[in-house]
Amino acid sequence: MKARKYDGEMDKIYNAMLQRFRRSGANIPGVLASFYLDVFVFKTRTVKADDIYSLNLAEQGTFSEVWREEQKKIGYLTWTVTQLGPRSRVDYKPGPKILKYINDASMLIDQVVTRSEFDVLSLRVDALETALDTLIELVDPPTSIEKRRIYTANPERLFIRGMKSRKEKSLSGEADEVMN
């Protein structure tokens, strides 16, 4: 896994974590920072031995006894074990040394849009819908919600349909009308 590239504020959080891991002498600090963000913020990974080994964060067979305990000792990882009959489930949480970074990154992901930002986005969506309706009306009249869905999902179909329509009109002598 290559260290991930982030944008803006998330990049600042990633770099702060990276610096913390470098200062502590962590093995592959960029991968470790990306791993913790993936697990606790983006929820695209889980803490599993196979992931730890595949990322070269620990030697094979050292997940529970060495790596996990080391992460707990330096404050990067905590967990609780819940017995579920004969099996048990381990729930991982960020440790106190990285909790601030994880919380800050989570707040960026969960940020609520303000009313003015929503109004701007709504105006853009309305303008795009109007433009799409105009194109549909020119190429494949009449406009309908179903056609809007189809052409939004497959815009190339609208282009192809438009090219066929233009070709048909030019062959039938309506080329001047098409060009205007």
Image (cartoon, helix red, strand yellow):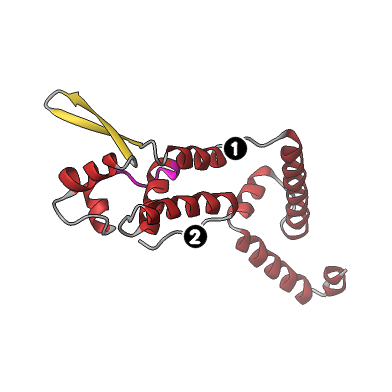
What residue does disc 1 label?
111
| Closer-to-camera residue (127/83) | 83
Q: Is residue 45 magenta?
A: yes
Q: Residue 140's quadrant in the figure?
A: bottom right
| Closer-to-camera residue (2/103) | 103
Residues in magenta, as a range: 41-48
Kind of residue sitting beneath label 2: Lys
What residue does disc 2 label?
5
Q: Is residue 171 left or right of residue 74?
A: right
Vertical side of 176 occupied by 12: above or below: above
The crowding category of the residue bearing disc 1, from other C-alpha atoms within 10 Å (few below 14, some 14 to 19, many at least 20), is few
Q: Is residue 22 left or right of residue 63?
A: right
- Residue at 28 percent of width and 39 percent of height: 72
Image quadrant containing the C terminus = bottom right
Label 2: state its secondary structure: loop
Between discs 1 and 2, the one toward the N terminus: 2
Kind of residue sitting beneath label 1: Gln
Q: Is residue 176 magenta?
A: no
- Residue at 73 percent of width and 55 percent of height: 136
Q: Is residue 2 left or right of residue 101?
A: left
Q: Are marks 1 and 2 in contact (CB under 8 Å)?
A: no
Q: Name the spot of residue 161 as percent of width and height, x first.
A: 66, 64
Q: Name the spot of residue 54 as percent of width and height, x first.
A: 25, 58
| Closer-to-camera residue (18/108) | 18
Label 1: state its secondary structure: loop
Q: CA distance from mark 1 to mark 2?
A: 20 Å
Q: How many marks?
A: 2
The crowding category of the residue bearing disc 2, from other C-alpha atoms within 10 Å (few below 14, some 14 to 19, many at least 20), is few
- Residue at 49 percent of width and 55 percent of height: 15
Vertical side of 87 occupied by 136: above or below: below
Q: Name the spot of residue 114 as percent of width and height, x first.
A: 70, 35
Q: Main secondary structure of the magenta part?
A: loop
